Amino acid sequence: MSVRIVISALALALPLACSSLAQAQDSAEKAKAVTEEGGKHFDAEGNPTFKIENGAVDWYTFSGYRRYHSDCHVCHGPDGTGSSYAPALLNSLKTMDYATFISIVAEGRKNVGGGKENVMPAFGENKNVYCYMDDLYVYLRARADGAAPRGRPPKKADKPQAAKDAEASCMGG
């Protein structure tokens, strides 16, 4: 009998523990780039992140800006600020971890509440999105942390060879 109670308690606690992990606040300190590989920057936990120096964004942040305004801004508003149709991703990225972001973009999601239904379509089959999911995450993370201002970044790093190779491989070119 006590084993059943322990298992039930764990079954109830696990989703709460996982949701609290996804709710951890991002910050400029957590987003700080500590490693770099092929021009792509990573934080201490190994998540993709931005690097902005002297007003110049890294290539992946710039690419994320371009991809966001190609496929996402129609629903989520300019520069991730939200709209009457979809939430402000600047707010979402403050509490959403990398894995959750990738999952939602790839698989989509449906929210029903307050008498209305919001549907995020799945982009897992759209090469113009899934080949650049890290770039989108990096750009939105930079916006959410206040490191990247609204609008087109005025200066950017050159496109690294690693980005060219990954793009050719993913896009089939």
Image (cartoon, grey):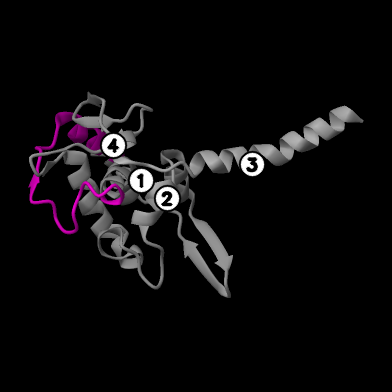
Report how far apart the C-alphas of labels 3 and 4 lie in the structure.
27 Å
Residue 70 location, quadrant: bottom left
Residue at 7 percent across and 40 percent down: it is 54
Q: Which residue is mark 2?
A: 105
Q: Position of residue 128 (x, y in %)?
A: 30, 50
Amino acid type for the residue under numbered disc 4: Thr
Q: Which stretch did the figure color magenta?
A: 143-170
Q: Who comes first in sequence, dot 1 or dot 2?
A: 2
Q: Position of residue 36 (x, y in %)?
A: 23, 25
Q: Are marks 1 and 2 in contact (CB under 8 Å)?
A: yes
Q: Position of residue 6 (x, y in %)?
A: 80, 31
5 relative position to 66: left or right: right
Q: Which residue is mark 1?
A: 130
> Marks 2 and 4: which is nearer the front?
4
**Label for residue 119?**
none
The one of 131 and 139 positioned closer to us in this rendering: 139
**Label for residue 15?**
3
